[in-house]
Image: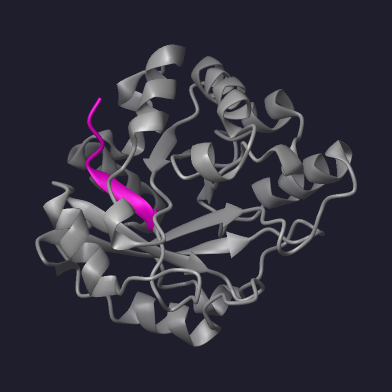
Amino acid sequence: MKIIADLHTHTNISEHAFSTLEENCIAANKAGLQAVGITNHGPALEDGASHWHFRSLGKNNPGKMHGVYLISGIELNIMPEGNVDLEEEYMENLDLKIASFHQEIFYPKDKNHVNDMLSEALLNKNINVFGHLGNEIFKFDYEMIISQCNKYNKIVEVNNHSFAQRPGSDVNCFEIVKLCKKYEVPIIVNSDAHISSAIGHFDESIKLLNEVGYPEELVVNSSIERLRDYFKQIRGIDICNR
């Protein structure tokens, strides 16, 4: 399986990441990718980007940099009530909104708490993707949530960074991807790179997809045609012509 775009990457707008937007684009081109997403953390995280960053990123996207299509986005923080940490007015020009749990923000009370937060997040029309759901700290009723993703137009990320940084994610992601296959929920494979040299690294994620036998036609970023169709659906734009 070939992945043609890495849509979850961070830049040094955050202190815990180390490369510029331009360096990420250059690295994506060098890795043979056709598109790269810039998805810095929302402002609730201690070194997350400010609301001005996201407004500017959405309004000033040149469409293409260093031979790759540039996707302007955000990694929102799912908050204890199931809401997210950026107002809609600052997201309206962004192409992709990933929403994730981070233990730096809070620890959930229990599994039911996470179920309730994700049930609320399902209803949020500003969320496109659920990021790194395999986190052991934020376990939930996988079938209850995954079975509803198509109803609310949510796709699921398989996050390559998780296999090294979030213990237990390999086992949890296996179960989640099996359910995505069962319910035909589309997924997206991303590196979650915090430095440009990590962009385009998907080996563990692809290995998992092969083990599950997940169909390539449901992987949104496995071809430029699928990726274009996805953004036409959610944003009404052609990422290759803007």
Q: Position of residue 199 (x, y in %)?
A: 30, 52
Residue at horizontal 50%, vertical 72%? Answer: 91
Q: Is residue 201 magenta?
A: no
Q: Is residue 155 visible?
A: no
Q: Is residue 54 visible?
A: yes
Using residue 3 as the reference point, say whether residue 111 is left or right of it: right
Query: In the depicted view, which residue is nearer to us: 164 or 63?
Result: 164
Looking at the rendering, which quadrant does residue 4 occupy? top left
Q: Position of residue 48 (x, y in %)?
A: 56, 75
Q: Position of residue 78 (x, y in %)?
A: 68, 58
Residue at horizontal 67%, vertical 56%? Answer: 102
Using residue 89 as the reference point, say whether residue 84 is left or right of it: right
Please say if 29 is above or below 24.
above
Q: Residue furthest bottom?
A: 52
The span shown in magenta is 1-8
Q: How many marks?
A: 0
Q: Specify the quadrant that holds the C terminus.
A: bottom left
Residue at horizontal 44%, vertical 32%? Answer: 186
Q: Residue furthest left?
A: 67
